[in-house]
Amino acid sequence: MFQAPNVFQRATLPPATRESEPRPRAVVITDDGPAPAPVRPAKDTASKRRDAYFDNAKYLAIVLVAVAHSWVPVMEGSRAARALYMVTYTFHMPAFIIISGYFSRSFDMSPAKAKRLITGVAVPYVVFETAYTLFRRYANGESDAAISLTDPWYLAWFLIALFIWRLTTPLWRSMRYPLTVSLVIAVLASVTPGITEHLDLPRVLQFLPFFVLGLQLKPEHFQLVRRREMRLLSLPLFAGALALAYWVAPRITTDWFLRDYSAQDLDAPWWAGVLMTLLLFGGAVLLTAGFLSWVPRRHMWFTVLGAGTICGYLLHGFMVKGVEYSGLIDRNDWLVSPAGLVLVTVVASAGVTLMCTPPVRRVLRCVTEPDMNWAFRRESAKL
C-alpha cells in the first residue's frame, strides 16, 4: 500500500564491450536500491514486486467482510448463524486493519506519501460518501438524506478512519509504548457516551489499536504465524471461539462487535466497556493470527484480486443494501433457513469476488486511484 523509502546508491558502470560480446544486464532501481536484473516487460516486473501472501490475505478478508454484512438480515432467529456472525465480526475488520497498518509503516508525510493519502483515501471517501447518500435517497426513498462528509454512512467509515490513522502514523512510530497508549484511548472511547459521532470517531478510536499493532509488526512476525504449528493450533482456537459464541449469542448484543457505541449507550455499566474492549482486542488478535496462518503463500487463482479489494469493499455495500431495500428477504422467508444462509453466503462471496477483478478496478481507477498530477506541484507529481 505504501512503499518503503528508496535507498539510492551509485551503480558501478559496466566495462566497455564490443558488439560481439553479450550486452550487459539492465540495472533496475527497486525499493532497496539498484539491483541487476534482466530486462523484462513492465507487467511482469510489477507482478514480481507484489507479495502473493498479502494479496491472498486481503482478498480472503474482504470476502469475510462482505459475507458477514450479508448475514445481518437473515441471521435473526438462528443461534448458529448469530454465533458465526459474532466470530467473523471479531476478527475480519481487525485483520484488514492490521494489514493496513503494516503497509503504513513508512508513511512520513513526504510529498509523495501525502499525495498518495489524498488520492488513494480522501478522494474515494468523498466520491463514495456522495454516491452512498444518493443511493439512499433514490433507491430507498430517503428524500431527506443529505450529503455530509463529516457523517460517514455504512462502509465509508473505514476510509475516514484510515485517513486519520495514517496521518498519526509518525506519532505512533515515535512513541515508546504505542500499543499501550492506543489501547488506553480505545478503552476511554468505550466508556465515553458523550463523544462526538462526527467522522464516526467512536469506531475510529476503538479500532485504533489494531492499526497501531500493524505498525509494530515486522516480516518475521508473519513468518511466525505461517508455521505449521500455528495452523494446527488455530483449529481448536476457532472451535473454542465458535462454542463460546454459540453460548453467549442469546445473552449479549452484537452491537459490541461494531465498536461504535459506548458501554452506557448499550445500557451496560462503564466497566463492561473496559472489559469488552480488552477481551475483543485479545480475541481479535488470536483469531487474526489463526486466519493468517491458513492464508496460502503461493500464487493462487484469486491472488490478482488482492489488488482490487478497495473496489470490493466499497462496491459490496450497494449490493447488500440493494437487496435490503428491495424487500427480497422479507418476501422470501426461506432465506432465513440454513439453506438460505448458505445461498446468501455463496452469492455474497461471488459478488465481492467479481467486484475485485481487474476490469472493475480499471473502470474505478479514476476514483479509487486517480493520478491528479494537475492538483499537485510538479515535484510532488514526479515523486
Image: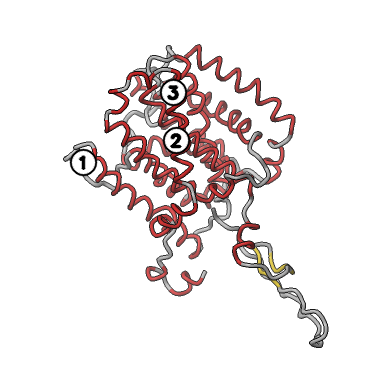
Disc 3 to disc 1, how far (Cα)?
Answer: 31 Å
Label 1: few (<14), some (14–19) or many (≥20) C-alpha neighbours in 10 Å = some
Check disc 2 and give the amino acid type.
Ala
Q: Secondary structure at mark 1?
A: loop
Residue name at image x 47 percent, y 69 percent: 380
**Nearer the camera: disc 2 or disc 1:** 2
* Labels 3 & 2 near each other (Cβ < 8 A): no
Q: Secondary structure at mark 3?
A: helix
Residue name at image x 21 percent, y 42 percent: 138
Q: Secondary structure at mark 2?
A: helix
Q: Is residue 264 above or below residue 370?
A: above
Asked if residue 215 can be seen in this view, the reply is no
Disc 3 to disc 2, how far (Cα)?
Answer: 13 Å
Q: Earlier in the sequence, mark 2 or mark 1?
A: 2
Where residue 145 is drawn, which disc sits there?
1
Asked if residue 85 can be seen in this view, the reply is yes
Q: Nearer the viewer, residue 268 or 350?
A: 350
Q: Nearer the viewer, residue 215 or 288?
A: 288
Q: Which residue is mark 3?
A: 341
Q: Nearer the viewer, residue 276 or 247?
A: 247
Check disc 3 and give the amino acid type.
Leu
Q: Is residue 250 above or below residue 346?
A: above
**Nearer the camera: disc 3 or disc 1:** 3
Label 3: few (<14), some (14–19) or many (≥20) C-alpha neighbours in 10 Å = some
Q: Position of residue 182 (x, y in %)?
A: 51, 38
Label 2: few (<14), some (14–19) or many (≥20) C-alpha neighbours in 10 Å = many
Q: Which residue is mark 2?
A: 66
Q: Earlier in the sequence, mark 3 or mark 1?
A: 1
Disc 2 to disc 1, how far (Cα)?
Answer: 24 Å
* Labels 3 & 1 near each other (Cβ < 8 A): no
